[in-house]
């Protein structure tokens, strides 16, 4: 399975699993593929089942209205805040300081919970990080008429999630619209 936009802020990558074509993490296989695409950004999950799918989708469904509100400069809905805080509190974390041979100090975050709750908490952490980032109001939705993906533009003129895909489709559509009567 391929994902249309990977490598944005982790919370945006999560939100972008709901596309115009459907839900890319609707089943364990889809979620496992997405987690594989996110390798190194999340703790490893040994097996992906329905519990992990439900936990991830619950965080994603709370993240969208919260981010929409923040982008408008408003307070996120109470239900979204409860859901995100619930995911965070279900898998509390603590830091462990380690000292690697020749590598110096390192901090690892440990969560005492099952895989589904741990995964939901990590994703909720990413959502909270995005919501509290001063750039959260700059998150944009792709301007292509058939795309719903979100991105945080590195350049203020960026209009499409992927210029080579949505941008090209928009340019081709404009060209045909101008030349259809010929």
Image (tube, rainbow, N blue to C red):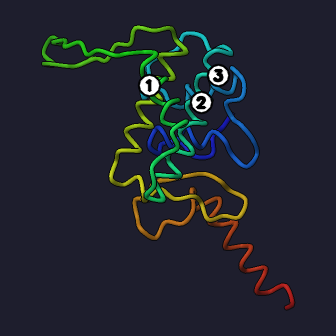
Q: Outermost residue toward the right?
A: 181
Left or right for 47, reference 8? right
Q: If you read the primary sequence from the N terminus, does the residue marked by circle 1 or circle 2 appear first? A: 2
Left or right for 21, reference 80? right
Q: Position of residue 52 (x, y in %)?
A: 60, 18
Q: Marks 3 and 1, Cα distance to the nearest angstrom?
A: 14 Å
User: Which residue bears the numbered disc 2?
Assistant: 34
Q: Quadrant of the C terminus?
A: bottom right
Indicate the secondary structure of the residue bearing disc 1: helix
Q: Residue at x 68, y 70 (%)?
A: 170
Q: Quadrant of the N terminus?
A: top right
For marks 1 and 2, give the one nearer the viewer. 1
| Residue nearest the observer in this picture, 90 or 7 | 90
Res. 94 image quadrant: top left
* 41 in relation to 152, above or below: above
* 129 in relation to 87, above or below: below
Q: Residue at x 45, y 9 (%)?
A: 113
For marks 3 and 2, give the one nearer the viewer. 3
User: Which residue bears the numbered disc 1?
Assistant: 122
Q: If you read the primary sequence from the N terminus, does the residue marked by circle 3 or circle 1 appear first? A: 3
Q: Residue at x 28, y 17 (%)?
A: 108
As drawn, the label of residue 53 is 3
Q: If you read the primary sequence from the N terminus, does the residue marked by circle 3 or circle 2 appear first? A: 2
């Amino acid at each position: 399975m391929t994902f249309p936009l990977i490598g944005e802020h982790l919370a945006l990558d999560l939100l972008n699993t709901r596309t115009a074509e459907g839900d890319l993490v609707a089943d364990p296989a889809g979620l496992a593929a997405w987690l594989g695409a996110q390798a190194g950004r999340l703790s490893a999950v040994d097996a992906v089942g329905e519990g992990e799918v439900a936990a991830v989708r619950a965080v994603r469904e709370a993240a969208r209205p919260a981010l929409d509100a923040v982008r408008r400069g408003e307070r996120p809905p109470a239900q979204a805040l409860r859901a995100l805080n619930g995911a965070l509190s279900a898998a509390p974390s603590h830091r462990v300081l380690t000292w690697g041979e020749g590598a110096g100090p390192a901090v690892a975050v440990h969560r005492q919970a099952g895989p589904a709750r741990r995964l939901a908490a990590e994703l909720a952490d990413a959502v909270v990080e995005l919501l509290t980032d001063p750039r959260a109001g700059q998150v944009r939705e792709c301007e292509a008429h058939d795309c719903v993906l979100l991105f945080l533009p590195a350049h203020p003129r960026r209009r499409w999630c992927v210029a080579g895909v949505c941008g090209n489709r928009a340019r081709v559509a404009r060209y045909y619209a101008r030349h259809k009567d010929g």
